Image: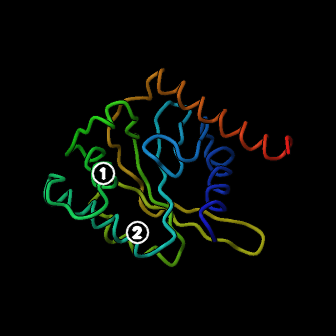
Amino acid sequence: MNSNRVKTYLFYYILWRWGYLGAATEGFNSSDVFAVRRNLYTVEFEIKLNRNDLKREVNIIKQIIKNKSIFGIRGSNTKVTKHGTYLGYWRFDRFIKEVIPNVFSFIVPRELEGIKEDLVNTPYGLYVVWETKNDWNIERIIKPKKLHKNKIRGEDLARFFRKLTTENYSLRKKIYLK
């Protein structure tokens, strides 16, 4: 299992099983997958396949919630400011122009499902992904809570569709214009 395979199958769920409007990889805020629902609410999915990487990020989140601040939090500055902003404890200039998703969820392989105990007191969701002989499965373990109730703004939706078009062009260029 690798993140590109997970992203590809997540796209299948987003489009065909969950009926979202669309999704892009490496979208707003360097998200693994950023999606827009038909009701114009946004969802960010963070794919974590490595236990240590997942634990580091969850520990940052728990510290921010406990301290109600990002100051003094050890860890990646990018992750600290991102989660500090999402959780309402920091407003950094870079994020003012970015889109804060309505909900945020981790997607992990089954063997990392035990992290759910650490996410219970956060607004974040958790999905588990696993591969069978002929299929992939994604199951929601923790339903994410809304970080805010604002729908995506028109200018951000336009940026989102530009990102989708750029991804589509790049893929088609690799396939058809070799």
The residue at which mark 2 appears reads as 54
Of 120 and 3, the residue lying toward us: 3
Q: Quadrant of residue 162?
A: top right
State the residue at coordinates (35%, 33%): 149
Q: Residue drawn 35% across and 48% down?
A: 145
Q: Which residue is mark 1?
A: 83
Residue at image position (41%, 56%) is 125
Judge the density around disc 2: few (<14), some (14-19), many (≥20) Cα neighbours within 10 Å.
some
Amino acid, disc 1: His
- Real-space Cα separation, disc 2 to disc 1, in angstroms: 14 Å
Q: Of all residues shown, which one is farthest toward the top?
A: 154
Callout 1: 10 Å neighbours few (<14), some, many (20+)? Answer: many
Looking at the rendered structure, the secondary structure element under dot 2 is: helix
78 versus 161 height, above or below: below
Residue 35 as seen in the image, left or right of residue 175: left
Residue 54 x, y percent position in the rendering = 40, 69
Rendered image coloring scheme = rainbow
Disc 2 + disc 1, Cβ < 8 Å: no
Reading the chain from its start, which is encountered first: label 2 or label 1? 2
Quadrant in which the C terminus appears: top right
On screen, residue 40 above or below 118: above
Residue drawn 36% across the image and 55% down it: 124
Which residue, as the protein is rendered here, is positioned at the far front? Answer: 178
The disc label shown at residue 98, or none? none
Q: Is residue 120 above or below residue 77?
A: below
Q: Secondary structure at mark 1?
A: helix
Number of numbered discs visible in the structure rendering: 2
Which quadrant is home to the N terminus?
bottom right
* Residue 154, horizontal then vertical, whole percent: 48, 20
The amino acid beneath tag 2 is: Leu
Quarter assignment of residue 134: bottom right
